[in-house]
Amino acid sequence: AVSRAFGKEEIYSILNLPFWHSAVKKLPNSTVVYDCMDHHAGFSTNSFGMLEQENFLLKEADLVITTSELLSKNVLKIRENVIIRNGAEINYFKAAPSEELLDKSRPIVGYYGAIAEWFDTDLVLRIAKLLPDYDFVLIGNVTTDVSCFSNQPNVKLLGEVPYHDLTKYLVSFDVCIIPFIINDLTLCTNPVKVYE
């Protein structure tokens, strides 16, 4: 982002991934804002180098924004930060969709978002077995093992859907769930889907 005030141009670099810091700090007159949305140490895919880069960014950024109370407390060990919680596109989510994309012959328990290492597949499988007369519709990119659902007929994995079609699925959900494993990573989240 670029702003002009008092005849001077200033560049605002808003980062949400630490590895961009080395490139951004080379920009002249740049104000660096770190939008810290995740507890990066909680991701199994993050290396020590990435965490080291985050520590540098936390110390050197002009402003650090966090999205949840616990994430803010963790960051506070290194530096001050401001909490700005997530939100939703209210007009998009309150408008009735033009069509529904799911069969509503049975109640639907739905989820949309990443189906990754923090997604509690065991919990969803147990609930699906307890409620065989309900359909469990899971929408999102899958990056974890979901083979446990292969013999569970009431669990449907739809993969990613276009954002503009999301409410066409959401309107059919009778219950929305966020089945995250409880750990440091998920306790530091402020899921956008809660607001949606």
Image (spheres, helix red, strand yellow):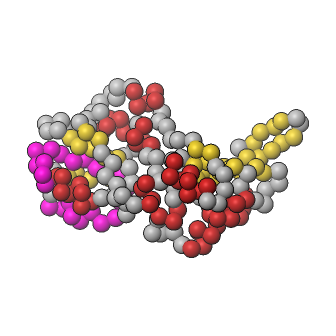
Q: Name the residue at the left extreme.
A: 133
Viewer-proximal residue among 98 and 185 = 185
| Magenta-tinted stretch | 129-151
Q: Is residue 8 left or right of residue 91?
A: right
Q: Position of residue 30 (x, y in %)?
A: 78, 51
User: Would residue 179 be counted in the magenta stretch?
Assistant: no
Work out whether 20 lies above or below 169.
below
Q: Is residue 127 left or right of residue 23?
A: left
In which quadrant will I find the C terminus? Answer: top left
Q: Residue at x 71, y 55 (%)?
A: 61
Q: Residue at x 17, y 38 (%)?
A: 107
Q: Is residue 174 left or right of residue 65?
A: left
Q: Residue at x 60, y 73 (%)?
A: 49
State which quadrant residue 115 falls in: bottom left
Q: Name the residue at the right extreme.
A: 7
Q: Position of residue 87 (x, y in %)?
A: 49, 37
Q: Position of residue 159 (x, y in %)?
A: 32, 53
Q: Position of residue 157 (x, y in %)?
A: 26, 53
